[in-house]
Each structure stands twice: as C-alpha cells, then as structure tokens.
Image (cartoon, helix red, strand yellow):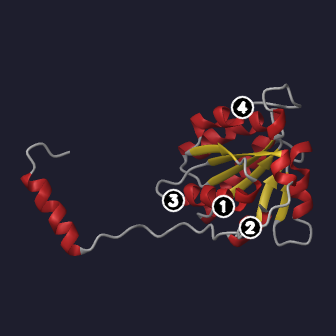
C-alpha cells in the first residue's frame, strides 16, 4: 500500500495511530512517505482536505477502525461539499472475524458511503496497490471528492507480490471534430433529445 501511495506522489499521510493500522506505520519507515500525527481522526481528515484543496492533489488520511473511522466521517462531509480530493484509509477488523463481534467491528463502507464518491473494502492482499491507485484516481477524477477504503488488518499484514500501478488520474477523454459534428447532427434530428 505504501508503494502505491509513493508511486502516486503522495509524500505525507495525516493520521492518528491505532491497532489495525500499525503495520502501515511500520511500512513507512525509511520511505519517502511522512506520517503527520494528529490528536483526533477528524483533524487528520481536515488536514487531508486542506492539502487537497491547496495542492489539487489527493490528501490522504489514515485512521483506525470502528470509533476512529466514525470520528473521521464528519470531516468527510466537508470535503465532499468542497469537492476536495481526499482518500480516507481506515483500518478494519480481519476478514475472518466479520460478523463475529471482532474488536472495533463496524460496517465502515456503509457508514462512509453517504459522504464519499465511492467506498469499498480491500479484501484481496494482491490487489491493495490497484485499489489504492483506483481510489486516488477517483478522488481527483471528474468532480473531485473523497473516497474511502476499508483495510482489514489481515490484508494489511499479508505478504503480497504485485506490481504497483500508477495512480495518476487518466487525462480527460477527447472527442475529435468529426465525431462532435456527427453527435450534433444526431441531436438536431432527434425527435426527443435529452
């Protein structure tokens, strides 16, 4: 995951430590991704939001599961309304303990969904880099806004060999002039255009 962030040009992550994300802290040691520590999860998201607004690059916040995730959600609302590119990474209970009352267990994806462009759980250790790249691209693509990834502890601690893709947003699609003229002609002839 840290590789995917670094490849995308993310050089800082705003965070408050917690059990489920300690492996990410360890992975940043000796890397060019700095951890900026806060005293509250909402502060981490507010800082990521400010970073996104000022730089037009995704601001990244990393929080722990359950209560930590819920503390971060109120700040996501502000980022959504400001169309700020933010990626919230939340630690989560291990996959095998879902629905069994695991420590700080919560359906974090459902909790975040109303205030983000997209939210999902990263359930395949071999796809962590791809999911991070996709989330970063979504945060800056189209109308910018926050995206949430829920990261089960066992996924974060798994050893996976994968190629980390570029997380840069794809350039906007262009329409050539002849296609644009054809579209205009079709709309002009339509009996019930959009």
Q: CA distance from mark 2 to mark 3?
A: 24 Å
In the image, taking residue 21 as reference, residue 108 lies left or right, namely: left
* Disc assigned to residue 107: 4
Can you say which quadrant of the picture contains the N terminus? Answer: bottom right
Sequence-earlier tag: 2 or 1: 1
* Disc 2: CA contacts within 10 A as few (<14), some (14-19) or many (>=20): few
Sequence-earlier tag: 2 or 3: 3
Which percent across, then down, holds residue 67?
81, 32
At horizontal 83% and vertical 42% (from top left) the residue drawn is 64
* Disc 4: CA contacts within 10 A as few (<14), some (14-19) or many (>=20): some
Q: CA distance from mark 4 to mark 2?
A: 27 Å
Q: Are marks 1 and 4 in contact (CB under 8 Å)?
A: no
Q: CA distance from mark 4 to mark 3?
A: 26 Å
Relative vertical location of residue 69 with respect to residue 58 in this rendering, above or below: above
Does residue 51 show up? no
Which percent across, then down, holds residue 185?
11, 61
In the picture of the structure, the residue carrying the numbered disc 3 is 141
At horizontal 70% and vertical 58% (from top left) the residue drawn is 127
Sequence-earlier tag: 1 or 4: 4
Sequence-earlier tag: 4 or 2: 4
Q: CA distance from mark 3 to mark 1?
A: 16 Å
* Disc assigned to residue 40: none
In the picture of the structure, the residue carrying the numbered disc 1 is 130
In the picture of the structure, the residue carrying the numbered disc 2 is 162
Q: Are marks 4 and 2 in contact (CB under 8 Å)?
A: no
* Nearer to us: label 4 or label 3: 4
Sequence-earlier tag: 3 or 1: 1
Which percent across, then down, holds residue 73?
69, 37
* Nearer to us: label 1 or label 4: 1
* Disc 1: CA contacts within 10 A as few (<14), some (14-19) or many (>=20): some
Can you say which quadrant of the picture contains the C terminus? Answer: top left
* Nearer to us: label 3 or label 1: 1
């Amino acid at each position: 995951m840290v590789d995917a962030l670094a490849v995308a040009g993310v050089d800082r992550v705003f965070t408050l430590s917690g059990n489920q994300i300690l492996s990410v802290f360890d992975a940043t040691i000796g890397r060019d991704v700095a951890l900026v520590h806060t005293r509250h999860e909402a502060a981490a998201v507010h800082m990521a939001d400010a970073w996104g607004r000022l730089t037009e690059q995704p601001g990244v916040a990393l929080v722990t599961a359950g209560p930590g995730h819920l503390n971060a959600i109120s700040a996501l609302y502000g980022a959504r309304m400001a169309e700020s590119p933010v990626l919230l990474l939340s630690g989560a209970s291990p996959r095998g303990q879902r629905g069994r009352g695991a420590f700080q267990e919560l359906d974090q994806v459902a909790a975040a969904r109303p205030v983000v462009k997209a939210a999902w759980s990263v359930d395949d250790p071999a796809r962590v880099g791809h999911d991070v790249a996709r989330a970063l691209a979504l945060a800056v693509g189209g109308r910018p806004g926050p995206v949430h990834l829920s990261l089960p502890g066992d996924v974060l601690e798994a050893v996976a060999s994968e190629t980390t893709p570029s997380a840069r947003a794809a350039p906007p699609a262009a329409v050539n002039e002849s296609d644009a003229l054809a579209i205009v002609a079709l709309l002009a002839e339509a009996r019930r255009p959009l």
